[in-house]
Image (cartoon, grey):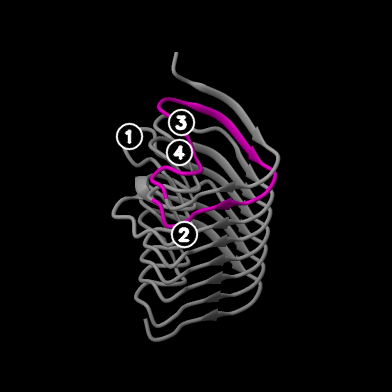
Amino acid sequence: NLDMGAVTITGDVVGASGTFSGQLVSSAKLASVTIGGSLIGSSGEASGQVFSEGSMGPVTITGDVRGGSFNAETEFAAAGAVVSGVNITSVTIGGSLIGGVGDLGGLLASGLNNLALKDLGAVKITGDVRGGGGFKSGQIQSSGKLASLTIGGSLLGGAGIRSGAVETQSDMGAVQITGSVIGSNALGAGRISSVGKLASATIGGSLIGAGG
């Protein structure tokens, strides 16, 4: 049995320049993850990353998820990220999801390698979702459904294409954003996109486009 049980880390998980530095990885299922500090990517491939090949249980991060400077070509290599090949039960971030200057830095992604089990459960972020300079940095993506999304701050596009965005390949549940949704000059930045149905969207502030 290659499954990994519940993991609790009181402080931060911090990547560095080395490949897979500061990475928590399971080649099968991962029961749950609790990080008392922040999850922080760096210049190394897959640095500051929580990854499971199989399904991932609830993920709770008290601080931020911060993308790094590594330019990832696939989600599996993203720096400062929570990534699963299958379902993720839920993700709770007490701070903000912050995109990095590197591509795919600051990423939540489910269902990357499973055609049947690919949904992302309820996502709750107390602060902002902020895009960065990298492509798809500061992004929430599901290859299937997204149960629900609650953002206590704002959804903010960055300089990177499709940064500061929420994207699903199937239905999206209720979306609640206390602040505003603000785009940028980059294509698809600061947006909510569902290939399937969108149950509802409530934005407490404004919806502001830009040149992208």
Report helix, strand or loop for mark 1.
Answer: loop
Three-letter code for the amino acid on which mark 1 is drawn: Asn
Image quadrant of residue 189?
A: bottom left
Height in image: 207 above or below 153? below
Q: Earlier in the sequence, mark 1 or mark 4?
A: 4
| Element carrying mark 2 | loop
Q: Is residue 22 magenta?
A: yes
The answer to which quarter of the image holds residue 8 is top right
Q: CA distance from mark 2 to mark 4?
A: 16 Å
Where is residue 24 shown, x and y percent of the image? Answer: 50, 36
Q: Earlier in the sequence, mark 3 or mark 1?
A: 3
- Which disc is residue 51 wearing? 4
Q: Residue at x 67, y 67 (%)?
A: 178
Gap between marks 3 and 1 measured at Cα: 10 Å
Image quadrant occupied by the N terminus: top left
**Looking at the image, do the residues carrying marks 1 and 2 touch, with CB atoms under 8 Å apart?**
no
Instruction: Establish if 90 lies above or below 195.
Output: above
User: Which range is magenta?
Assistant: 18-44
Q: Mark 2 = which residue?
A: 68
| Residue position for label 1 | 114
Residue marked by disc 3: 55
Determine contact: label 1, label 4, CB under 8 Å. Answer: no
Q: Is residue 69 magenta?
A: no
Residue appearing at x 65%, y 67% in the figure: 153
Q: Is 13 displayed left or right of 189 in the figure?
A: right
User: What amino acid type should be assigned to the residue bearing mark 2?
Assistant: Gly
